Amino acid sequence: MSELLELASRLADRAAPGEQVEVFVGREHETSVRVYEGDVEHFTSAQTEGAGIRVVRDGRTGFAYTGVLDERSLDECLAEARDNVAFGEVDEWSGLPEPDGVAPVELDLWRDSLLAVPTDRKIELALELERLTLAQDPRVVVQGSDYSDVWAEVAVASSTGVRSATRETACYVYVETMAVDGDDTQTGWAFSVGRDPSGLDAERTAREGAAKATRMLGATKPASRRLTVVLDPFVTAQLLGVLSSTLNGEAVLKGRSFFADRVGEEVAAPLVTLVDDATNPLAFTAAAVDGEGLATRPNALIADGVLRGFVHSSYSGRRSGAASTGNAVRGSYKSSPGCGCLALQLAPGTKSQAELVAAVDDGLLVQTVQGLHSGVNPVSGDFSTGAEGLLISNGTLGAPVRELTIASTLQRMLLDVVDIGGDVEWLPMEAAGVSLVIRDITMSGA
Amino acid sequence: MIDHDVLQRVIAAALRTGAEFAEVYAEDKRSSAAHLDDGKVEEVTSGRDRGAGLRVVSGETTGYAHTADLSETGLLAAAEAAAAAARKGGGGANIVALSRRDVRPVNTIEVFPETVGKARKVELLKRADAAARAAGGAIVQVSAGYGDSRKRILVANSDGLLVEDDQVRTLFRVTAVASGDAGMQTGYESVGHTVGFELFERIDVERVAAEAARRALVKLGARPAPSGSMPVVIKAGSGGVLFHEACGHGLEADLVAKGASVYRGRVGELVAAPNVTLVDDGTMTAEWGAIAIDDEGHLSQRNVLIQDGVLTDYMWDFLRARKEGRPQSGNGRRQSYQHLPMVRMTNTFVLDGTDEPDDIVRATDKGVYVAQLGGGSVNTATGDFVFGMTEAYLIENGEITDPIREGNLIGNGPAVLRDIDLLGNDFAMGNPGTCGKDGQGVPVGDGQPTLRVKAMTIGGTAA
C-alpha cells in the first residue's frame, strides 16, 4: 500500500458508528522553468501536499482541508469536518459511495524517466524551444519559453470501503510569442505535452508559436455579418469545456441545464457523437478512478445527434435514481468532489483542416477566442466571445482579422455543426481538440 | 510565525551561492465557507493553508522554492533549493540583520470571522435563499455562498526588511436562475470587503439576494443583443473592469518591460480622453483589493497612473523597480506562498467627471446601457480586450428601453480610452473581483462613474 493510501485509510478507519468518513490525500512535486532572451528568468521547485476530509452523518455533510500533513493538522482537519457536519442541512441523497464492483482500467500514466531528468536538461529544453522559435522568422519575439513538469500521487479511502491510489507524471513546454512588424504587434502561443520529455515536440511547438503570431500581422477589424466558422482544435476543446456543464447530472437535477428532460431527443446535428471517457490512455486527463475513488468508464452523452444521458457523481447518481458514472471531480484536496466531465471527445471525421476550409464559401478560421468566462452562459446558452483568426473566402484562407466577436447560442451551435475534422489533438484540458465547422454564426466587427 | 534568528539563518543560507537578494514569504491562512444550493445548506467547509516561499535573485534569474514545513529544517531545505536554482559561482554566508517595520492596517477589523459561530454564517444563506425566491415565482433556483479568510503573512528579506500583516476578507454572493418561455436566465450579485463579520451590519443579505433575482427576472424578457459597433454607456460602479482590462494590465511594468504592452514608451503622452484620471490604490479602506503591505513587504500606496488623460506611470514590483533603479509602488502581489510575486493591480478606478448620469443617457440616440459587467480579459500586446455584460439594455432616442441578452463587448484599449466622451459625477466602486494573471488569482477592486464610450463592438446576434 502506498504511503498516502495508508495515511488516508488510517484516518477513514476512525469513523465512528453512524458516521461516514472519506479522506482524499494528494502530493505533487513540480518544477517549472521560464527562460527569456537566453537566460533563466525563474526556476521553481516545490512539493505540495494536503488532505481533504468529508464526513457524512444523518444525511448531513461537512468538509475540511489542510495543506499540512502532520498528525496534529490532520486531527484538527477531521475535527473541523465533523464540526461542520452539524451546520449542513439534511439531504436524503447525501452519502459516500460504496465500491460498485467496476474494476478500474490499468492505465500507464507514470514514467520513472521523468523523475530522472536533471535540472540542466529542463533548462535546456526551455532554451531550445526559445532558440527554435526565434529561428522561424526574424519578426518573431519570444515573451517567455517554459518547461514544467509534475509528478503526482493521489489516494482516496473511505469508511464505506473505497481504497484507491493512483499516480502520474506529466510535462510540457510552452512558448508565448509576438510578431513585430513596424507598429504592428500580434501574439501567438503553442505548447506540447507528454508524460516525460521524450513525448515533447519542440520543433512543432516552435513552428506553431511563430506561425500563429506572424499570420496575424496586418489584421484588421472585419465588417459584421453571418458566416461559417472553422474552429481550431484548441478552440473546439474550449467550447466542449463550456458545454460540459450542461451535461453534468448535478446541474440537470438542480435545473441549471437546458438539456434536462431532453434525453432521447435530437439536440445536435446527426454527425455529432460525444463521449466522456477518462479510460482512454491518449487523453491527457486520463484517470483510472474519479474524485471519489470509483472506476472511470466510457459514457456516451450524445450519439448521432441524440442526447443519451448525463455524467454523475455518487450524489447526483443516487438522487437521479441511477448510479455514479465515475464522474466525481475535485480540483484538489481543497474541495469536496463535485460532478463533471473528465475527458470529452467528439467522434472525429476524416478531413484535414485544409479540406474543411476548402468547403467554406464565406467563413472565419478561429485561431483564438477571448472571454469564454465572461460572454458565455451555460444556463441560458448565450454564446458570445472575442476572437481572432483568418477570413475564408471561396475555400481559401485570406486576410487576418481581430477585435471581433462570434456569437450564437450553445443550443443552435450544436444543431448547426456542418463537419468535424479528423485532426484529433489531445490537449491538457478535459476535452480533446478537433477542427469543427459550424454555420450561421454572427461575427460582430466594425 | 517564524523566529527572528531562524529567518536570519535561512536568508544567509539562501545567499550562499552568491545571490544578491533573498526573501522569505510565509503565510498562515484559515478560511471558512458555507454553500447553499437547491434550497439546502449543502456543506460547511474549513481550510488551513500554511507554508513559506523562498525567493533568491541572482542577476536576471530568480530561484523559487516553497514548503509547507515551517521548521528551520524545512525552510533551510527550501532555501538551498531556491539558491541552487539561482546560483552564481562563489559567494559566502552573511547574516543579515532584520529590523521589524510597523504596518498601519488598512482598516480595523471589528469582528474576526473565527469568533463567529458557524450557525450565524449559515443563517445568512437561508435568509438570502428566501429573499431571492420571494422576488418572483419565476425564480426556480438559488445558490448562495458565504466565505471568510484570515491570512497572516510575514516577509523578511536580505535588505533587512521584516514585516507582518494580518489580512481579513469576507464575501457574500448569490446567483439566481429564472425560468420563462424563452428559457432560463441567471442573475448574480456579490459583496466583499477586507473586513470581518461586521460586514453584515452594513449590508443586507436580503438586498443582495433580491438584486440577483431581479437581474435574472429582467433578462427573461431580454432581446438578442445587437451585433456591431455603437455607443456604450456604462453605469457607475458596474464597469471598473473596463479600465482593469483596457489599460490596467497594460500598465504593469513586467509586461511593459517585455514589450508586451501597447502603453510601452508612452509615459508623458496623452493616452486617454482628457477627462480621464486613473488611479490604483491599495490603501482604499475596506475595499476588496486593499492591502496594508504587498506580498513583497512594501507598504501599499495610492498611485496615479493616468492624470487628465496623460500617462504618468506604470505599476511596479521589486524586480522591475530594481532593474529600473526606481521605487516600488506596492503592486508586488501573489496568490499564495506557492507562487512568485509579480506586478498586480489592487483597487483600480477612474475619478469623477462632471456630467450628470441622466444627461449621458439622454445624449445617446442609439446604443447600449450596461448596468452590470461580468469578467473580462485582455491581450496587452495588441490592446484588444473583452468584457461581458450580465445586465444590459438598449438605449433608444435617449432612453433606456428593452433588456438584452448576455454577451461580450470587444474593444482596443488605447482607442476606447480616447473614445470616452462623457464622464459622470456619480463615482461608485463595483463588485469584488478576482484578477487572473499567469495562473494566479488575487483579489482586486474597481470603480468608475457613469460614462460613455463613443463606439465599441457589441457581440450579439441581432442585426
Image (tube, coloured by chain):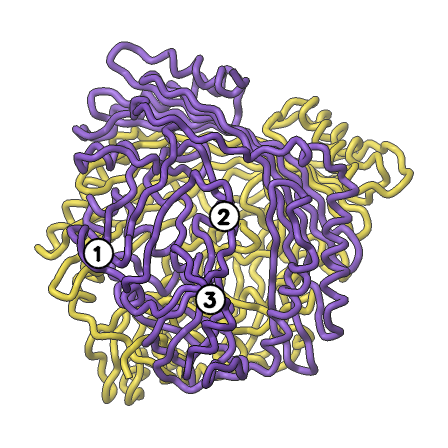
Chain colours: A purple, B yellow
Gap in angstroms between the C-alphas marked 1 and 2? 45 Å
* Residue B425 placement, left or right of B415: left
Task: Name the residue nearer the viewer: A343 or A59.
Answer: A343
Report which residue position mark 1 lands on. Answer: A258
Q: Could you tell me the amino acid type at mark 2? A: Val
Task: Name the residue nearer the viewer: A401 or A14.
Answer: A401
Residue at figure coordinates x 76%, y 37% from the top left: A118
Residue at figure coordinates x 48%, y 64% from the top left: B377
Callout 2: residue from which chain? B
**Residue B313 in view of the camera:** no
Q: Could you tell me the amino acid type at mark 3? A: Lys
The residue sitting at the left extreme is: B137
- Other-residue count near label 2 (Cα within 10 Å), few / some / many at <14 / 14–19 / ≥20: many
Report which residue position mark 3 lands on. Answer: A351
Residue B408 position by quadrant: bottom left
* Residue B64 placement, left or right of B235: right
State which mark lies toward you, 3 or 1. 3
| Disc 3 to disc 1: CB gap under 8 Å | no
- Other-residue count near label 1 (Cα within 10 Å), few / some / many at <14 / 14–19 / ≥20: some
State which mark lies toward you, 1 or 2. 1
| Disc 3 to disc 2: CB gap under 8 Å | no
The residue sitting at the front extreme is: A350
On the image, the x and y values in percent for residue A323 come to 24, 33
Q: In which quarter of the image is the N terminus of chain B?
A: top right
Q: Residue B429 carries which label?
A: none
Gap in angstroms between the C-alphas marked 3 and 1? 31 Å
- Nearest to N terminus: mark 3 or mark 1: 1
Q: Is mark 3 on a helix, strand or loop?
A: loop
Report which residue position mark 2 lands on. Answer: B106
